[in-house]
Image (spheres, grey):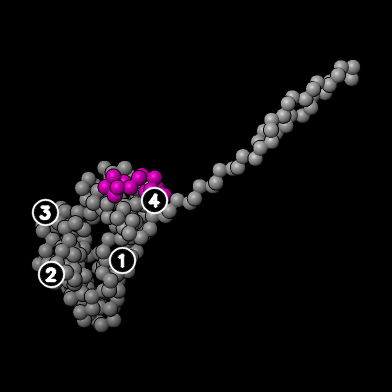
């Protein structure tokens, strides 16, 4: 509603101007209703978007992945994505974090058995035998080297969870007396996947249960159970 103008001061000798005719009073215009809050991206819709993110990551790699491409694959608007994730680094990290992980750790009674189960998987096509997971990890390596935001988010949100799973396996082996008390568990945790993935990415080997067994039997267990120079 327009505010009434202040009356204009006039000379006393001059008659005051007649007031302008007023418009008929009517109902005051109502303010438009506040927009309702936009729905959050949760539940099944969130899972669909995260799966679409992994599909695009697998198809084109991290460098060429865009929020537009993910939105198109998920049949969502880009605005929907930005309501939940502030950019592709956080979106990709969350998608990778949400990938399948064991609901419970293997407990075979031996370090060898636990490592074989953990890295060869509880079922065919999982763990290091999962070609999709290996391909996604290749994209992760590229992203870590080129995107500082991604690297920081990956190390904060994904690495601790994966390390905790591996550490529990090694802690149990230590309690059973299978490895020496002074073993550097931080080094041993990364030894098996590090060697296998090196042979896959650098040497072109296939990730097979036989390769995992060779690394366990010829490198990991001997190093963990015997001291230097034994």
> Which residue has dot 4 on it?
85
Above or below residue 26? Residue 94 is: below
Q: CA distance from mark 1 to mark 2?
A: 21 Å
Badge 2 marks a residue whose secondary structure is helix
- From the top left corner, tell me how far across and down residue 103 is, in percent: 28, 71
Q: Residue furthest right?
A: 13
Is-magenta flag for residue 46?
no
Q: Nearer the viewer's eye, disc 4 or disc 3?
A: 4
Q: Which is more N-terminal, label 4 or label 2?
A: 4
Viewer-proximal residue among 191 and 120: 120
Label 3, label 1: how far apart the Cα atoms are: 26 Å
Q: Which mark is residue 213?
A: 2
Please, is residue 101 above or below residue 154 in the view?
Answer: below
Q: What residue is disc 1 on?
A: 163
Dot 4 falls on a residue whose secondary structure is loop
Mark 2 is surrounded, within 10 Å at the Cα level, by few (under 14), some (14 to 19) or many (20 or more) other residues, namely: some
Which is more N-terminal, label 1 or label 4? 4
């Amino acid at each position: 509603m327009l505010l009434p103008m202040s009356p204009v001061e006039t000379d006393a000798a001059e008659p005051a101007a007649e007031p302008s005719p007023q418009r008929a009073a009517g109902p005051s215009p109502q303010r438009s209703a506040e927009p309702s809050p936009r729905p959050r991206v949760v539940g099944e819709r969130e899972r669909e978007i995260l799966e679409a993110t992994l599909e695009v990551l697998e198809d084109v790699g991290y460098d060429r992945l865009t929020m537009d491409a993910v939105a198109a694959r998920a049949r969502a608007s880009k605005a929907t994505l930005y309501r939940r994730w502030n950019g592709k680094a956080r979106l990709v990290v969350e998608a990778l974090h949400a990938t399948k992980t064991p609901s419970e750790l293997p407990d075979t009674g031996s370090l060898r058995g636990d490592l074989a189960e953990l890295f060869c998987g509880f079922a065919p096509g999982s763990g290091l035998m999962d070609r999709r997971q290996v391909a996604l990890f290749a994209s992760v390596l590229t992203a870590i080297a080129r995107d500082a935001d991604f690297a920081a988010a990956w190390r904060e949100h994904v690495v601790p969870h994966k390390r905790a799973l591996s550490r529990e396996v090694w802690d149990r082996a230590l309690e059973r007396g299978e490895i020496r008390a002074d073993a550097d568990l931080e080094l041993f945790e990364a030894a098996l996947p590090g060697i296998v993935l090196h042979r896959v990415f650098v040497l072109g080997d296939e990730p097979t249960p036989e390769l995992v067994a060779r690394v366990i039997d010829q490198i990991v267990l001997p190093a963990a159970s015997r001291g230097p120079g034994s």
